[in-house]
Amino acid sequence: PVVGPLALASVIALEVGIRRAWATWAFAGVTLAVALWAPLDTVRAYHAQESGFNTKMSNVANFLLEHGEKGFSVATPTIGVIGYKLLGHEVIDMVGLTDTMVARHPQEPIPGISSSWRERKYNAEYILQRAPNYILFSTSVKPSAPGERALFLYPSFLDGYRMTGFFGANRVQIIYAR
């Protein structure tokens, strides 16, 4: 929020009449320093959250590799480390970033399902027809992505999957198993 006004101020200052080179360079240096320093805490906080999320999903993948049956499949809205760790297993993308069926044929949005996710495409019926052995939610228990929330409207999810958990990364990790 600081960079925009500073940039505008620098342009105005140049236009209005700071004709001295040292003043222009000093102002540019201060603007650059503030632009780099101001968001540092935000970047550090974001990095810590992403690192924690990757550790959590890595623990889930390791658990599935150790305890899942051979050739299992998993559906998740956050492919990332899951897709990397579970090479050789079917990993189904619930939001259509890597699944063309979901990307090109999303189901109509369900009224009342809101989300802060940018990835709003989903096809819960298609995901359930593929019958993955496991369904992972990005937040573990509470569905946050629209595709996660939509699953709870289908009897085949409610009757066919059970919530199960394990202890990992100093917390209980929840997955839905068929």
Image: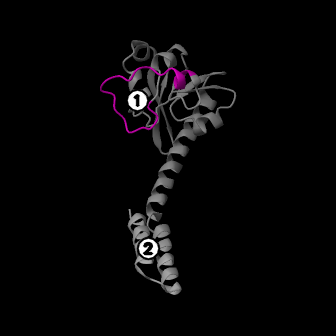
Q: Main secondary structure of the magenta part?
A: loop
Q: Tell me where residue 101 sits by quadrant.
A: top right
Front: mark 1 or 2: 2
Residue extent of the magenta highlight? 101-120
The colour mode here is one colour
Residue 76: give its label.
none
In the displayed image of the protein, which residue is found farthest to the left?
Answer: 112
Amino acid at the residue labelled 1: Pro
Residue under the image location 44 percent in, 68 percent down: 7
Residue under the image location 69 percent in, 27 percent down: 88
Residue 116 inside the magenta-drawn segment = yes
Q: Tell me where residue 147 sits by quadrant.
A: top left
Residue 153 is situated, as x and y percent measured from the top left of the image, at 36, 18
Residue, disc 1: 146
The residues tagged by marks 1 and 2 sit, at their Cα atoms, a distance apart of: 43 Å
Amino acid at the residue labelled 2: Ser
Q: Is residue 44 depicted above or below 10 in this figure?
A: above
First along the sequence among labels 1 and 2: 2
Residue 124 is situated, as x and y percent measured from the top left of the image, at 46, 20
Question: Which is more toward the observer, 14 or 131?
Answer: 14
Residue, disc 2: 10
